[in-house]
Image: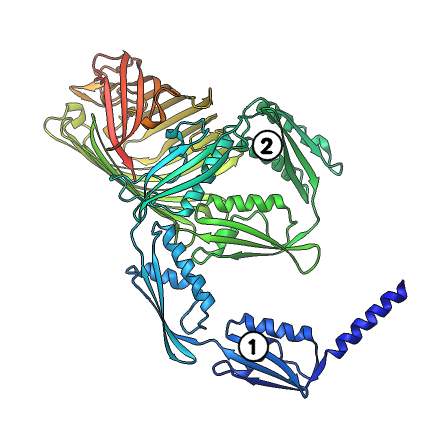
Amino acid sequence: MNKFFTYILAFFLYFTFLNAEVVKELEINGNNRISKETIKVYGGIQNLNKNFTNQDLDEILKNLYGTNFFENVNLEIKNNILIVNLKEYPLINTLLITGEKTKKFSEEIQKIIKTKENGSFVESDLKQDIITIKNLYSSIGYNFSKIEPRIKEIDENNVDLIINIDRGEVTKISKINFTGDKKVKDKRLRDVITSQEDKFWKIISRNTKFSENLINLDKRLLTNYYKSIGYYDVEVESASANILDSSQIEITYTINAGQRYRIDKITTNVDKVFNKDIFFSLDKIYKKNTGDYYSPFKVKKILDEIDEIIEKNNLQFVEHRVNETISNDNISLIFEIFEGEKTLVERINILGNNITNETVVRSELLLDEGDPFTNLKLEKSIAKIKSRNIFGKVNQIIKNGSSKDLKIIDIVVEEKPTGEISAGAGVGTDGGSFAVNIQENNWLGEGKQVGFNLELDQTSIKGELNYTNPNYDLLGNSLTYSLYSTQNDSPDQGYENSLFGFGVGTSFEQYKNIFTNLALNFSHDDLRTTDNASDSLKKQKGKFSEISGKYGLTFDQRNRSFMPTDGSIITFSQLVPIYADKPFLENRFSSSMYHSFGENFIGAGKIFVDTINGLNDEDVRISKRKFLSSKRLRGFKKRKIGPVDGSDHIGGNYAAAINFEGNLPNLLPDSSNAEVGLFLDFGNVWSVDYDKTIDESNKLRSSTGVAMNWISPLGPMSFVLSTNLSKASTDKTETFNFNLGTSF
């Protein structure tokens, strides 16, 4: 047998030798603009006087075609001379983008296409570029754009290329339908997806424009939402688009929710190389989740607990996975913890970041070059990059390194628009209001956030400019700078004031689910009064400055931050003076608890307490006094409860509210685009420090009623029909309240 393999090897070597020939000279023909030396370097044929096998010649062909300089390459060895016959692609002397009026888009197109000025003219590249340009316009709603290339031949080796673009009309989403066994009301599904129906009040919104990327995002959001409430095998079967004309399209999502599953059993399977005892603490979270509806968020929390144990015990090369087994309407979870392959990270490449700085991506990585490689840390790193919300796609490619125990990781990102603009307008029983918000989430490609918002109503104008670094100095802490101004004009109460300030703050996760917030603020308040102001209010007029510090803690155990159905969030903050003309101490506490009583019935309980007290026998200024918003105490007019000075409601030193609310499932058909809920509110605003003769108004107020949100042809409307259960004699109540407005 050994002799047989020896003969085969000898035959192979002999055959290779017969097909090899010693090359002593190199002859290159057909190169007009590419020099001979460049061809030798790119082709890898610098060294002569050696045998050139067929494999060597194939490698030279591959190298030369890979330059994209040559349309045709032929190789021949004759009389010990390697003859390279070439035909060069024509050179593009001038490349013009016409028809596109926006300079930004013209520049972006020239960046993303393969065809370049002073580069080779390759027809296959041009065809692909046309598809790329159409995809770009489709992503912003121009689904019927026309791209026409015009080629002008100057001579055999030179061309001018003109790419003419006709955007066409923007394709707007005229209607969104949900069909199938969806089990969830359309109103809630509309809140889940990103796409929106085109309405006259949404003239600024980008989400009313049809694009395939937006539809794919909607399908992922719908799938994730259904799975989060227990529909493990949900299928968003199709997203059909009915084209009405070039500017209108109707979208239909067909959903098969399937069976809703509960978690009936959770176990751990630990590799024998690890000490099982260190994972016993998982039993507590297992018991908490057993019997609940399945949710990938619950699974993720358990995986996070496992990661914490692994990190705490400094375990290396550890991997884990979860096996999910379905039986009837139950799911069993088995978490397997095992020793992974012992490899290291040789190199991490960041690709596709044409705008974003590489450091922004690397700052989110839990893996570094030289670290032990685990899929666990790589997947968590990818999740952190995605959470920055500045990339359309984030993918990873794992390749073998220079040795078998090394890995090379390519992280490929796809840039997306990161600017947002929204506006809101409303009119109701309390008057009209308008708000606008502009946000950029990737300022100068550095991952920083810059925002501006403006709010106007009948008595005030508020503006704020803020700048946030979400990962300051690569420490994982956010750093925020803010500048704000408020103008209040209350002629009925006889005063107006101007408030100006700026601040700097930071926030970070102190412990698991516990977040710390720290801030330093400066403000200046100018209070002016008129003749019809009360005597007590006139005593407070003047200019006041202060420097204050603020700290806060947040304990977040919600199952998700958007549309939570279970869990709670508790926050506490305190503001203390460092320097103040009128020093005060401010405390705020809030807690919200959520629970799902059925597929479409979510209940919530909320507590809110807000206090302010003057220090050094100083009184609290009018601009600092506390009120309850109409969302925390319904059935009462805005800022019309609590202590009264003369005929003016002046707010209190203390404000508190307790709210119970829940939606009524299936009360109205899906076609109504309306959602109805019940509420029970308790609240109080009391205490006056600047005048002991004024009644403190320390009385519990309460109300109950029905609230409805309706997507009407005129825009989103909210209605509140309430009745007061208890009130003070000076309170001003309202039985009915409505608002018409939207964000777009």
Residue 602: percent from the left, percent from the top? 43, 22
Q: Relative to 640, does residue 214 appear above or below in the rendering?
A: below
Q: Amino acid at mark 1?
A: Val
Query: Neighbour class for label 1 at 10 Å: few (<14), some, many (≥20)?
Result: some
Q: Is residue 719 left or right of residue 87?
A: left
- Give the image quarter of residue 668: top left
Which amino acid, by three-letter code, is at mark 2? Ile
The quarter holding residue 178 reads top left
- In this rendered view, identify the residue nearer to me: 162 or 506: 162
Q: Is residue 595 above or below residue 547?
A: above
Q: Mark 1 = which residue?
A: 73
Badge 2 element: helix
Q: Quadrant of the N terminus?
A: bottom right
| Residue 536 coordinates in the image, percent (x, y) | 18, 23
Image quarter hosting the C terminus:
top left
Q: Secondary structure at mark 1?
A: strand
> Which numbered circle lies on residue 302?
2
